[in-house]
Every structure is written in C-alpha cells, then in structure tokens.
Amino acid sequence: MDGLIVGIDREIKHKPLGARAYILTSAASAAWIMITLDLAAIMVEAGEDIAVDPTRLVQGLVGALGFLGAGAIISTTSQGRLRGVASGAAIWAVGAIGLAAGAGMHAQALTLAVLVALVLNAYDVIVGDEDADG
C-alpha cells in the first residue's frame, strides 16, 4: 500500500482528496496491471493467436487517472489561482505507484511514493504556504 504514504500526507493537510482516494487509486492501478499481466501470460501459455500488449492498459490508465486528478482541480482562490493542482498531480503519481507495485516493481513503487511525499512536503516548507495549490 505505497499509496498510503501519499494519502496520509494529503489527509493530514485536509486536501481535496483524502487518503481513501489515494489508497484506492494505487490499489486499483496495481490490480489492473496484475490482471492484465496474468491474462497475457494465460493467453501466451494457451498458444492463443492473439496480440497481447499489456502496455495498452498503462496508456488507458494514464488518461483515466488524468481525468480523476482533474476532478480535484475544480475551484479557484479569490486571487484567481487554481486549487487542487498538487492533489491532481499526486493522484496521477499514485496511479504510477500502483502500476509499479502491481507489476512487481516494489522498490520503484516505494521510491516513487517517498519521492512524491517529499516533494509535497518540501514545497510546503520552502514556500511556507500549505494551501498554495492544493
């Protein structure tokens, strides 16, 4: 549950998307890639005369995650700045974390989870404005 690392940060800061959204996005992304890889292996073993390309799932998920992240970016501040941009980007990154975990790339998933959490927190420290872009 590498998505939990990012989700807890967002939950503590009361951002537009809470921990559940990040955990579910990461877990669902992991499940989709595991199902796809298993299906591809079954088809190859059975000698099915069909083209199997698991990367097509990744392409579809990138678009779907972008749509989900865009849902977090729906309001502006009184100064005209968008809110929720960081949450939208983080939900997109959590999808990648889930894909990596589901594909068995656990070191990469954990590294990305820590990197995302560091970026979200370092920005707050450097700029000093937790609500700069949600």
Image (spheres, helix red, strand yellow):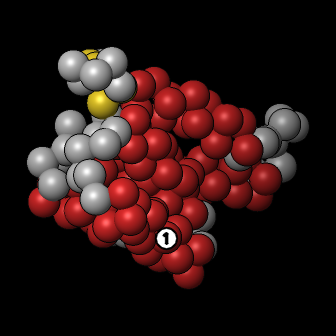
Position of 57 relative to 26 (above/below): above
Quarter of the C terminus within the rendering: top left
19 relative to 38 in the view: left or right: left
96 relative to 11 in the view: left or right: right
Other residues around mark 1 within 10 Å, as few (<14) / some (14–19) / many (≥20): few
Quarter of the N terminus within the rendering: bottom left
Position of 70 relative to 84 (above/below): above
**Which residue is painted at 59% across and 74% down in the image?**
108
**Which residue is painted at 26% across and 52% down in the image?**
129
**Residue 133 versus residue 31: which sits nearer the camera?**
133
The answer to whether one can see residue 84 in this image is: yes
**Which residue is painted at 28% across and 22% down in the image?**
79
Kindly indicate the quadrant of the structure image that contains residue 9: bottom left
**Which residue is painted at 78% across and 42% down in the image?**
53
Report the residue that reaches farthest toward the bottom: 107
| Numbered disc 1: secondary structure | helix
The residue singled out by tag 1 in the image is 115
Q: Where does residue 45 sit, x and y in percent of width and height?
A: 76, 58
Position of 120 relative to 112 (above/below): above
Q: Where does residue 58 sit, x and y in percent of width and height?
A: 64, 42
How many numbered marks, from 0 up?
1
Q: Where does residue 86 sit, x and y in percent of width and height?
A: 39, 43
Position of 61 relative to 71 (above/below): below
**Residue 123 versus residue 2: which sits nearer the camera?**
123
Q: Where does residue 69 sit, x and y in percent of width and height?
A: 40, 32
